[in-house]
Image: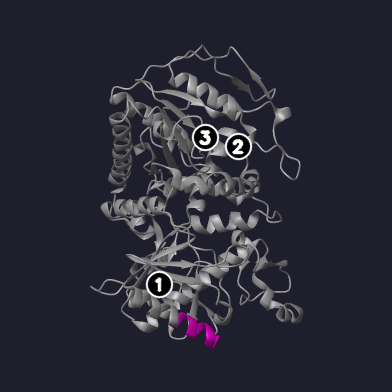
Amino acid sequence: MLTEYDSAHAADFAAANLDGEIHDLQNPVDGCQVITYFPLASKEGWDVYRRSVVFLLITAVHELDATAEVKVDFSANKGLFIEVCLGKRTLTQEDVTRIEERMRVIVQEDRPIVKSFLPRDEAAERFRRVNSLEKANLIAAMQRDIVSIYRCGDYEDYLYGAMLGRTGVLGKFALDFYAPGLLLRTPSLTSGGEVPAAVPQPKLSHVLLEAKRWADILHCDYVSDLNRLNRTGQIGDVIRISEALQEKKLAEIADHIAKRSDELRLVLIAGPSSSGKTSFAQRLRIQLRVNGLEPVSISLDDYFRNRADTPRTPEGAYDFEALEALDVPLFNQQMVALLKGEEVKLPYYNFLTGEREWGHYDPLAITPKQPIIIEGIHGLNEALSAAVPRRNKYKIYVSALTQLNIDAHNRIPTTGARLMRRLVRDYQFRGATALKTLRQWPDVRRGEERNIFPFQEEADVMFNSALIYELGILKKYAKPLLEVVPVEAPEHVLARQLLDFCQYFDDIEAEDEVPNNSLLREFIGKSVFFK
């Protein structure tokens, strides 16, 4: 229970940290637990707020039409894309208006959101009775004996995380009709606590809808579907079809570049951390060779300025992710010269000395049949390659946009899936502990928000590097790493969240079915592209 002081200030809090785990403020505690609080104006606080507003929306839809089905799909346009299925009828603007009005009424009523605890099997049976089979199956397979259920009015649900205790505090949200569903926007840490304006992202939305189609092809929308396919011996086909879908997309991209090869001379690849950009670039190179081209790859890392000239963060650390850390004038000068057919001496950056060196590479000259492949975080930023005409560039955004949902009301955030990849890769190939990787992650995310995401719609094409089966394999590597993160470390909260996330996935033992050119091999090892 909260202390008297805590109760008086509960409106300032979103959740509690009990011995390194996030709990809502309804959670019973004993006198021995170490308690700190997450304010609403924190990343964890706004995550709790968003989850609570999703619950509010589902409650409102249920009260308007108990037969309607809601599916929380993915994050886009500064919000969550959510499908509302009304039988055979298509969702309309009028439906979205009614849903928002009902949500506002429930907020005005300031209803309690009541948490209760049920035995696992009883909770699973309760959801089975209301035909939430994917949720029932997942709960039944969980490793915990007691499950928490939330109720608002007559509606109850399980949302895999802490929620706020009353609807009256959930008034900050916006709802937009976004065919074929709706877009729910809530405040975040980066929006300063206000509802962010919608930012049209048609290309991102397209690739996310493509990911849904891939999941439909595999008959694998939810984690319980993946577990079933694994248990029934069908996971080999899931792996092969997933890989084939990516290879087909890669071939389409290469075909497009080849058809315009007289014009498209510079191929720029960018994406957030652990998207598999390096393996993607290698596989694209092979597909371009299939089309009769002879691409050359140039590393942006070799254009770093000398360490003494590297900009610093406000804290005084070197800011290697800033565009200014690269010698942009030299890069532009050399790209223009290469595209003119001139011979160029490329720089080499020595990471040990922090100095640029010359003579490491043979002089380079290219023919019109040799597109240049550039991979790096600033690839989509027009300022990187401003001297090269836009018509001569083809920009590719690569990101792991998870196709899988935990269940209809609980999505898998793409950032969480990428973090699992990074944890495994950093340990396997860089000798980094999970604690070190988790400690670096906030800085990585800030760099992505500044240098990558603002430019993603500049891409000519987006490639989804997520593999629907990968978390069942990554889990085996990540779980023992996360289990040794010290409880007293601030990063234990995130480690605990990832461990809870891992419990929903069965181990996939068919790792030998993963081909050696798979993007996943970049993280788990035995990739043909990394020796």
- Tag in front: 2 or 3: 2
Picture coordinates of residue 127, whole percent (x, y): 38, 74
Q: Determine which residue is flagged by label 3.
A: 376
Give, as a single range, the part of the protein colored magenta: 102-110
Measuring 35% from the left and 34% from the top, which residue is drawn there? Answer: 515
Q: Residues within 10 Å of mark 1 (few under 14, many from 20)?
A: many
Which residue ends up furthest to the left in the rendered image?
88
Magenta stretch encompasses residue 406: no
Nearer-N-terminus badge (2/1): 1
Query: Measured along the vertical axis of the image, is residue 472 above or below residue 194?
Result: above
Give the quarter of the figure containing the N terminus: bottom right
Q: In the structure shown, which secondary structural element does the residue marked by tag 1 occupy?
A: helix
The colour mode here is one colour
- Tag in front: 1 or 3: 3
Which amino acid does the dot numbered 2 rest on? Leu
Decide if residue 111 is in sight here: no
Measuring 36% from the left and 60% from the top, which residue is drawn there? Answer: 224
Decide if residue 462 is in sight here: yes
Q: Residues within 10 Å of mark 2 (few under 14, many from 20)?
A: some
Q: In the structure shown, which secondary structural element does the residue marked by tag 2 occupy?
A: helix
Q: Looking at the rendering, which quadrant does residue 19 occupy? A: bottom right
Label of residue 436 in the image: none
Q: Looking at the rendering, which quadrant does residue 405 occupy? A: bottom left
Left or right of 157: which side holds 321? right
- Compare residues 66 and 462 and report the one nearer the observer: 462
Q: Determine which residue is flagged by label 2.
A: 323
Which amino acid does the dot numbered 1 rest on? Ala
Measuring 73% from the left and 74% from the top, which residue is drawn there? Answer: 31
Q: Determine which residue is flagged by label 1.
A: 124
